[in-house]
Amino acid sequence: MSLKGKPVRVSPESIRRAIGVKRWFFNKRLVKTRQFLLEVNESTKNYRIRKINWAIEDRIQNEKSLIQYIKYRYMLVLAMEMMKLRS
């Protein structure tokens, strides 16, 4: 989803809300719709990374302090590296 402003996680629920449809959107007989939703579904981890990157870019554009976002991004990278080592 390419919207201006704060990022929104790409999930079946957020797509349903964005286009304004009701529960029929999740009908099991809509095979192609369900397949598409599974393909575009964004993991929580990827969403958080995208949101942090957006926040950093937003702060740079608005000339605000980056300290808290840089610390969080660094912690996130370290956590991801630790998860790789455990696997």
Image: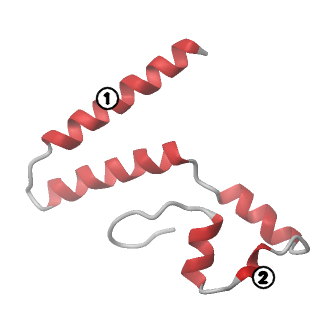
Q: How is the image coloured?
A: secondary structure
Q: Position of residue 17 (x, y in %)?
A: 57, 79
Q: Is residue 16 left or right of residue 72?
A: right
Judged by depth in the image, the label closer to the viewer, 1 or 2, is 2
Q: Residue at x 47, y 51 (%)?
A: 47
Q: Is residue 62 left or right of residue 42?
A: left
Quote the CA–CA distance across marks 1 and 2.
41 Å
Q: Residue at x 50, y 42 (%)?
A: 45
Q: Is residue 56 left or right of residue 83?
A: left
* Label 1 vs 2, first from the N-terminus: 2
- Dot 2 lies on which element? helix
Q: Say which mark, if any, is on residue 23.
A: none
Q: Is residue 27 left or right of residue 56?
A: right
Asked if marks 1 and 2 touch (Cβ < 8 Å), the reply is: no
Q: Position of residue 62 (x, y in %)?
A: 12, 62
- Dot 1 lies on which element? helix
In which quarter of the view is residue 30 placed?
Answer: bottom right
The residue tagged 1 is 75
Residue placed most toward the observer, 63 or 65:
65
Q: Residue at x 50, y 60 (%)?
A: 9
Residue placed most toward the observer, 77 or 26:
26
The residue tagged 2 is 24
The amino acid beneath tag 1 is Met
